[in-house]
Image (spheres, helix red, strand yellow):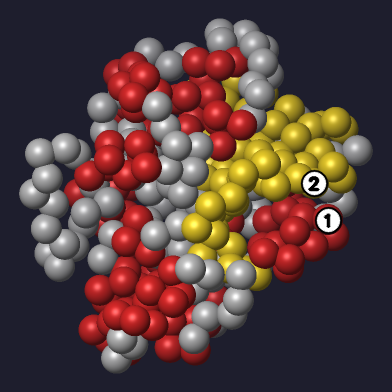
């Protein structure tokens, strides 16, 4: 029951972001910069200006914690699965890489995100992209059908990450690859943050310890697991922009404690291969 309540909170939180068209979806955050906050977040987490400009307007909601497409070494004609595709930002970038002979499928559990992504795909003429409603723990994708899986700051939101990686293993072809950008921890979070719904939607409370995350991928059957990049990730750039403020207000945690937590939150880009 608790897992279903958290899943509902995540779905509602991202639905609100999809409807507002921005990660700045809370009245507690003032989005007054002349530069779009979504563009600024994307620059800070590794997207080039060219990539930001290449996707349909409104597909980039500033929700990632890295740029998995930049590390994925996508080739023309490949079949790509974007796990937790949101409004389609990474799916559209991947579609340009694999070309008309390739195929990109995005899976997301939030209907509002899917509606936005499909609208952008139609308006942008992306004939090699489709978006499916589904949960990442039960992917609506056939066995052994995908060349590469990408995902951006989504798996940390799952209650059952072991199931997610087993599903990823199932749908990949032999020799298929993972390229995941995600949030992990260097040390356990304080209990108040770990129990915060706002922190869960903001990718904090559901994050695993780094070593456990790697072990989970390995236990699913993947080989050649490698962290190709990692960096500390500012709490203020988490998916639900007012996360840090909400935690401080609702739990009594001090700003100093938040800053201490920030040093233990990592954005990693991790790859693996199905033998």
Q: Residue at x 72, y 53 (%)?
A: 165
Residue 62, position as x, y percentages in the image: 33, 44
Q: Quadrant of residue 55?
A: top left
Per the model, the C-alpha gap separating discs 2 and 1 is 7 Å
Image quarter where the N terminus lies is bottom right
Question: Is residue 8 something that shows in the picture?
Answer: no
Callout 2: few (<14), some (14-19), or many (20+) C-alpha neighbours within 10 Å?
some
| Vertical comparison of 179 with 216: above or below | above
Residue 224, position as x, y percentages in the image: 85, 42
Q: Does residue 12 appear to the left or right of 30 in the view shown?
A: right
Q: Residue at x 79, y 32 (%)?
A: 176
Check if mark 2's residue and mark 1's residue have beta carbons within 8 Å.
yes
In this rendering, the label closer to the viewer, 2 or 1: 2
| Vertical comparison of 266 with 272: above or below | below
Name the residue nearer the viewer: 127 or 251: 251
Residue 218 disc label: 1
- Please report whichever mark, 2 or 1, sits nearer to the chain's N-terminal start: 1
Image quarter where the C terminus lies is top right
Question: Is residue 57 something that shows in the picture?
Answer: yes
Q: Residue at x 59, y 50 (%)?
A: 230
Q: Quadrant of residue 122?
A: top left
Residue 71, position as x, y percentages in the image: 61, 31
Q: Which residue is mark 2?
A: 225
Q: Does residue 148 appear to the left or right of 86 in the view shown?
A: right
Residue 44 disc label: none
């Amino acid at each position: 029951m608790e897992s279903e309540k958290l899943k509902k909170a995540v779905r509602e939180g991202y639905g609100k972001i999809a409807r507002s068209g921005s990660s700045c979806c809370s009245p507690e955050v003032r989005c007054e910069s002349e530069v779009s906050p979504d563009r600024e977040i994307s620059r800070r987490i590794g997207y080039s200006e060219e990539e930001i400009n290449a996707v349909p307007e409104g597909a980039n909601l500033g929700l990632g914690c890295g740029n998995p497409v930049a590390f994925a070494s996508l080739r023309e004609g490949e079949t790509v699965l974007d796990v937790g595709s949101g409004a389609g930002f990474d799916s559209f970038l991947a579609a340009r890489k694999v070309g008309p002979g390739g195929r990109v499928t995005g899976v997301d559990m939030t209907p509002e995100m899917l509606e936005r992504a499909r609208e952008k795909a139609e308006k942008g003429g992306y004939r090699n992209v489709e978006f499916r409603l589904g949960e990442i723990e039960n992917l609506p994708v056939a066995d052994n059908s995908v060349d590469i899986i990408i995902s951006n700051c989504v798996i940390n939101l799952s209650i059952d990450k072991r199931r997610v990686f087993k599903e990823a293993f199932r749908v990949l072809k032999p020799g298929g690859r993972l390229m995941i950008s995600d949030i992990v921890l260097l040390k356990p979070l304080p209990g108040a943050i770990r129990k915060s719904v706002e922190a869960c939607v903001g990718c904090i409370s559901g994050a695993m310890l780094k070593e456990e995350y790697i072990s989970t991928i390995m236990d699913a059957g993947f080989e050649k697991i490698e962290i190709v990049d990692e960096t500390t990730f500012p709490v203020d750039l988490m998916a639900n922009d007012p996360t840090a403020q909400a935690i401080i207000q609702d739990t009594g945690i001090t700003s100093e404690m938040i800053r201490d937590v920030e040093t233990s939150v990592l954005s990693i880009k991790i790859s693996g291969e199905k033998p």
